[in-house]
Every structure is written in C-alpha cells, then in structure tokens.
C-alpha cells in the first residue's frame, strides 16, 4: 500500500512538471509610445468615432520586461493601424500595433471619457510574438488637442510550476488520506 502511494505521488509530480515545461512563456512588461493622430467621424475629439494615426507609425517612449529584452528601446518606430472605436471597427483590429515581432490585436474598446478637448479610451486584446504564448493585455489611449499618448501593458498571471506541484501534492495527499480511512 505504501509503495503504491509513493508511486502515485511521484507520477503526479512528474505529470505536473512535464505539462508546465512544455508551454512557452507569456509576454510580460509594458511599452509606451506616442504619435500624431487626427480624430475621425466628427468635428473634433468631443464627437469623434475613430482615430487616424497620421503616418501609421509611433515612437517608442519606454519599455520594460520582454519588450526591453527583445531589444526595443526609446526612439524605435513601430506601426499602428487606424480604427473606429464607436462602434469598434474592424472587430477585432488585427493588429492594432506591431513592433519588433510583437503584435497587439484589439478585441474590445471602452470610451472612458470624451469631451471637446480630451479623449480617453481603454481596450483589451491579445499580444503575440514568436516564442511566447498569446497573452491577454490592455491598451489605453489618452489624447488631447495638444498631442497624444498611447499605452500598452500586459498583466497576465500564470501559476508557476512550484505552485502547481504543491497543489498536486495536496490533492494526492487528500486522496491517499481518504483511501486510508476506508
């Protein structure tokens, strides 16, 4: 009986670690960028329904995490696609932006604040890059008549292998204890 419980525990640990090591990592970090834009679908920011990114590019202002590890630095230039936010069109916007092998697909957008001199949008979607799992992320746009700032950040939390192993051991222990009682 003791040997079969030990074998079950070892098999459970091996299974947990083999599954965790087979997947790629999620993208982590943030990238901020800015560029020129023009509101579309209205007479100004207060009644705009879309954004035209002039030149269809942006300048990187700052990076952290995997974006920095990929060699992206302030001053680099990426590309960004125009879109309509009220309602979102096309849906999804794929990609909304891309740089150095990273791309962000915008799947939902919210108008947080809209007035004649200011527009604040937020959105969610997926960032992808070779060697990484697709990662849920968020995006925001803050624009005023003087300029614009765009911000992307990824904040996905993933259980690490050690946590999975502890959970697995706990479940195996409960099963073994229950079996011993019967």
Image: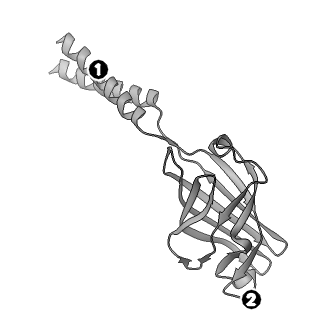
What coloring was used for the rendering? one colour
Sequence-wise, the earlier of marks 2 and 1 is: 1
Q: Compared to 32, does 176 lie above or below?
A: above
Camera-side mark, 2 or 1: 2
Residue 76 x %, y %: 74, 54
Q: Please rate how many residues cluster around mark 1, counting C-alpha atoms within 10 Å: few if below 14, some from 14 to 19, many from 20.
A: some
Q: What residue occupies the far right of the structure in this picture?
A: 146
Residue 119 x %, y %: 72, 73
Where's the C terminus, which quadrant?
top left
The quadrant holding residue 56 is bottom right
| Residue at 55% over, 79% down | 87
> What is the number of the mark on residue 114?
none
The quadrant holding residue 44 is bottom right
Residue 50 x %, y %: 64, 79
* Residue 55 left/right relative to 9: right
Q: Compared to 101, does 164 lie above or below?
A: above
Where's the N terminus, which quadrant?
top left
SS at mark 2? loop
Q: What residue occupies the far left of the structure in this picture?
A: 182
Q: Please rate how many residues cluster around mark 2, counting C-alpha atoms within 10 Å: few if below 14, some from 14 to 19, many from 20.
A: few
* Residue 124 left/right relative to 71: left
> What is the number of the mark on residue 43?
2
| Residue at 76% over, 66% down | 35
User: How many angstroms separate mark 2 from mark 1 (CA)?
Assistant: 67 Å
Q: Are marks 2 and 1 in contact (CB under 8 Å)?
A: no
SS at mark 1? helix
Residue topped by disc 1? 9
The quadrant holding residue 66 is top right
Q: Compared to 22, does 43 lie above or below?
A: below
Q: Compared to 174, does 110 lie above or below?
A: below
| Residue at 73% over, 66% down | 142
């Amino acid at each position: 009986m003791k040997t079969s419980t030990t074998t079950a525990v070892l098999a459970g640990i091996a299974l947990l670690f083999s599954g965790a090591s087979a997947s790629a990592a999620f993208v982590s970090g943030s990238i901020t960028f800015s560029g020129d834009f023009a509101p579309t679908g209205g007479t100004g920011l207060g009644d705009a329904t879309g954004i035209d990114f002039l030149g269809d590019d942006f300048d990187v202002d700052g990076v952290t995490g995997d974006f920095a590890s990929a060699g992206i630095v302030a001053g680099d230039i990426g590309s960004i696609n125009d879109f309509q936010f009220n309602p979102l069109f096309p849906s999804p916007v794929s990609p909304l932006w891309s740089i150095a092998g990273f791309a962000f697909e915008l799947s939902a957008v919210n108008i947080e604040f809209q007035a004649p001199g200011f527009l604040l949008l937020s959105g969610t979607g997926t960032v992808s890059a070779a060697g990484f799992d697709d990662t849920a992320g968020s995006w925001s746009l803050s624009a005023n008549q003087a300029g614009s700032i765009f911000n992307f950040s990824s904040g996905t939390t993933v259980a690490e292998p050690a946590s999975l192993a502890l959970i697995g051991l706990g479940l195996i222990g409960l099963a073994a204890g229950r079996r011993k009682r019967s």
